[in-house]
Amino acid sequence: MRRTTLRPARRVCDRAVCVALCAVLASVPSPGCNLSLDLPGAENPFRDLPPVPRDGRLHSLRANLAPLGTLMEGQTLRLLVRGASVTNVLILLGDEREDAAGVVVGGGPVGTEFEFRAAEAGSYFVFVHSDPSGGGDVQLLVGPPGQAPASPRRQAVLVSFAPDYLTHPGLWDPIDAGEENRALLASLSDLVREEILIELRALFAETPIDILSEEEALPAGPVSRVTFLPDRVPAEDQDAVDAALPVPDPSRPQCQVRVIFGEVLPRGAAVDVGNRVPDDEAVVYVGSFQGRGKECWTSAINSVSSVVLTLSQTAAHEIGHLVGLFHVEQIDVMNRTATLAFLRELPFGRGQVQLERRRGSERVGEVFTSVIQDPAVYFRAVFQTPR
Ligand SMILES: [Zn+2]
């Protein structure tokens, strides 16, 4: 029997040991790798489930997808999702391309009321991502709006650089490089900064996101910030969100040190779902990209253009999180390992979202094939820009 619950297509984990564990769990029925909300009987949850009454009362959910029914352009609803196991609450718009999929157009906090305004007419859904080991009831309230705040039309992002972002340690190799190399990096700092700003402005040119430098006058409204810091930050625990291993290389196991390339602050904030925080912050840790001696050199920093590409794509990835973009399965700016794994210019594209939750001490990513992230659709919805 097919089930209406949206199931993750596969799980990806930060560590090889976690991948192995998932493989074992997936082969036997286990709550450890399945979602607990279930509603057998219907073929397509995007089509067959009844809408949740918009009566301002809490209703228990039996599936992880709940239809909100049809909304007209500009129509606003008040929502609340409660449940100890809930990790993410997303609003989906029925996909134009696929019958059984939805595109992310917003979301909100767990356990706190929030407003959602439909940027265009269509069928809308609430998707609830849960930790199956969390247990307990999941409840959804849908009601008439209170005072819906006006959505911003654009998001300003100030990109700033610590004075020694390339050199202390920055990209300075602590094993092989001498002071002359540090002087060379210092001499390149201004050039790399300017080139990163050019790259970021090009990447966000067709979006409602304005990239600002420290030399520019800031707008009157709230501003998000991304700062390039010189630090090398080893990933000490599973709280690290944008941590990744360098490209696997069994011949150099001593170089497989897990580091954090960038993150939304404070640590663990991960994604500003629905872009509800217009003055949030992220960092790029330049030192995490450094080569370490002849054995652990990295092609990511073997030329000025590689340095600019690596650092600007990492900043773009963090800016994506600041406005509410999740990781995606596809090779894209929002792929969690994009920067070092692919080392080429990547777009913001349409992809299947990868949502993360904890299982014990591990952070597990689950890919949902029917939950689509399309930055163009998302930006139109969140920034209320004309279609
Ligand atoms: Zn990320």
Image: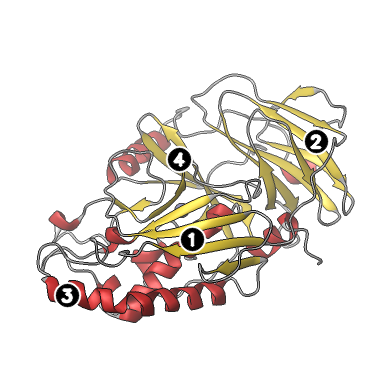
Residue 245, position as x, y percentages in the image? 29, 55
As helix, strand or loop, the secondary structure at mark 2 comes to strand
Residue toward you, 113 or 370: 113
User: Looking at numbered disc 1 in the image, what kind of residue is underneath it?
Assistant: His
> For numbered disc 3, what is the local secondary structure?
helix
Which residue is under mark 4?
268
* Depicted 280 relative to depicted 144: above or below: below
Residue positioned 25% across, 66% down in the render: 167
Task: Establish whether ligand 1 lies closer than 8 Å to the Cβ of label 1.
Answer: yes
Amino acid found under the numbered disc labelled 2: Arg
Relative horizontal placement of residue 340, taking residue 312 as reference (left or right): left
Going by the picture, which residue comes out furthest to the top?
136
Q: Measure how far apart labels 1 and 4 are at the Cα level.
A: 15 Å
Q: Earlier in the sequence, mark 1 or mark 2?
A: 2
Residue type pointed to by label 4: Gly
Q: Residues within 10 Å of mark 1 (few under 14, many from 20)?
A: many
Marks 4/2: CA–CA distance: 27 Å
Q: Position of residue 45 (x, y in %)?
A: 72, 41
Q: Mark 3 or mark 4: name the one nearer the start of the chain.
A: 3
Mark 4 or mark 2: whose residue is earlier in sequence: 2
Dot 1 or dot 3, earlier in sequence: 3
Q: Residue at x 13, y 71 (%)?
A: 179
Figure quadrant of the C terminus: bottom right
Q: Which mark is residue 181?
A: 3
- Identify the image quadrant of the N terminus: top right
Q: Report the disc number at residue 317.
A: 1
